[in-house]
Amino acid sequence: MSRPLRSPGPAATAARAGLSADEAPAFDRLVTAVLSSPGTALGPALRAQLPGSAGVRWLRTAGLPPTTRTAALTAEQWLSLYRCWRSVTPVPHAGRPDRGRAGRPSAHGHAPGALAAPRWH
């Protein structure tokens, strides 16, 4: 069973209002991911969302301890976190599938859908 989503709070809502319509869905993804992390401390939530030490660096530049709760963030801090997240998170491209290898490789040793040339004995 999934956990109910916590309310983003007035600061996150105010930060979202300051973004363009193109950036709002990405901001919503960040807020949802941070709020759905287990626990209430911001440090572990950022460790799950920002690669490497980016979350720790952001907390340090914002002057926040890792035990800070998301409800304590101001609108400016939400926007700063969003900018940090966007700078280290790859941007998905609409209409273009992921170019990574998905699924099992071809069982017959050729590209998916390709068949070996028939051998006539």
Image (cartoon, rainbow, N blue to C red):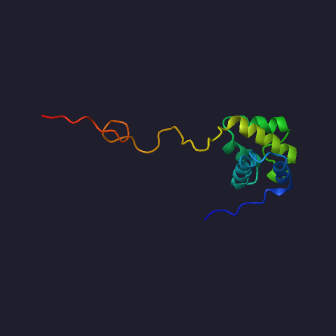
Total residue callouts: 0
Q: Residue furthest left?
A: 121
Identify which residue is drawn at 83% across, 54% down: 13
Q: Residue 109 or 44: which is nearer the viewer?
A: 109
Q: Residue 44 or 12: which is nearer the viewer?
A: 12
Q: Could you tell whether 102 is left or right of 14 in the image?
A: left
Q: Position of residue 45 (x, y in %)?
A: 71, 47
Q: Residue furthest front?
A: 95
Indicate the quadrant containing the C terminus: top left, top right, bottom left or bottom right. top left
Q: Quadrant of residue 23?
A: top right
Q: In which quarter of the image is residue 53?
A: top right
In this rendering, does residue 36 appear at all?
yes
In this rendering, does residue 55 appear at all?
no
Indicate the quadrant containing the N terminus: top left, top right, bottom left or bottom right. bottom right
- Establish if 26 lies above or below 8: above
Identify which residue is drawn at 33% across, 38% down: 114
Identify which residue is drawn at 76% across, 50% down: 41
Q: Residue 12 or 121: which is nearer the viewer?
A: 121
Q: Position of residue 48 (x, y in %)?
A: 66, 45
- Establish if 16 lies above or below 101: below
Q: Position of residue 87 (x, y in %)?
A: 72, 35
Q: Position of residue 86 (x, y in %)?
A: 72, 39
Q: Quadrant of residue 112?
A: top left
